[in-house]
Amino acid sequence: MLSLREENFQLLELEAQHRGITVQELIRAVIIPDWVKRSSIVRAVPASPYTSASREQFVQPLGGVRRLRNG
């Protein structure tokens, strides 16, 4: 289950409409695979006391969505 704020859902909805797919399809076909790819890259880098690998895992995929919308 996934819960989103209204503005985040609207962003996903706009991107899905732009691609001609549903929000669910966007999440399954684009968002999750991108998150898995980025998450595995973050895990491959050893965490230091100055960085939070878990925070990076959640921040990076959102940046990917924003780039897709502008592209």
Image: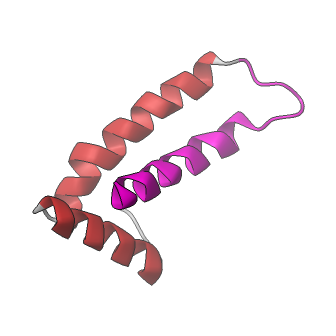
Residue 60, given in percent of the width and then of the height, sits at: 56, 45
- Residue pictured at 38% horizontal, 64% vertical: 2
- Does residue 37 appear to the left or right of 17 in the view shown? right
- Residue pictured at 36% horizontal, 53% vertical: 68
Which one is nearer the viewer's eye here, 1 or 58?
Answer: 58
Q: What residue range appears in magenta?
A: 46-71
Q: In the image, is residue 48 above or below residue 13?
A: above
The colour scheme applied to this rendered structure is secondary structure
Residue 15, given in percent of the width and then of the height, sits at: 27, 64
Does the magenta portion include 49?
yes
Residue farthest toward the left in the current orientation of the protein: 20
Q: Quadrant of the rendered structure where residue 43 is? A: top right
Q: Quadrant of the N terminus?
A: bottom left
Most common SS among magenta residues:
helix
- Residue pictured at 12% horizontal, 61% vertical: 21
Residue farthest toward the bottom in the current orientation of the protein: 6
Q: In the image, is residue 45 above or below residue 65?
A: above
Residue 18, given in percent of the width and then of the height, sits at: 19, 65
- Does residue 71 appear to the left or right of 24 in the view shown? right
Does the magenta portion include 70?
yes
- Residue pictured at 16% horizontal, 59% vertical: 19
Q: Quadrant of the rendered structure where residue 47 is? A: top right
Residue farthest toward the right in the current orientation of the protein: 49
Which one is nearer the viewer's eye here, 45 or 65?
Answer: 65
Q: Quadrant of the rendered structure where residue 32 is? A: top left
Residue 51, given in percent of the width and then of the height, sits at: 81, 35
- Does residue 48 appear to the left or right of 16 in the view shown? right
Residue farthest toward the front in the current orientation of the protein: 71
Q: Quadrant of the C terminus?
A: bottom left
The count of marks equals 0
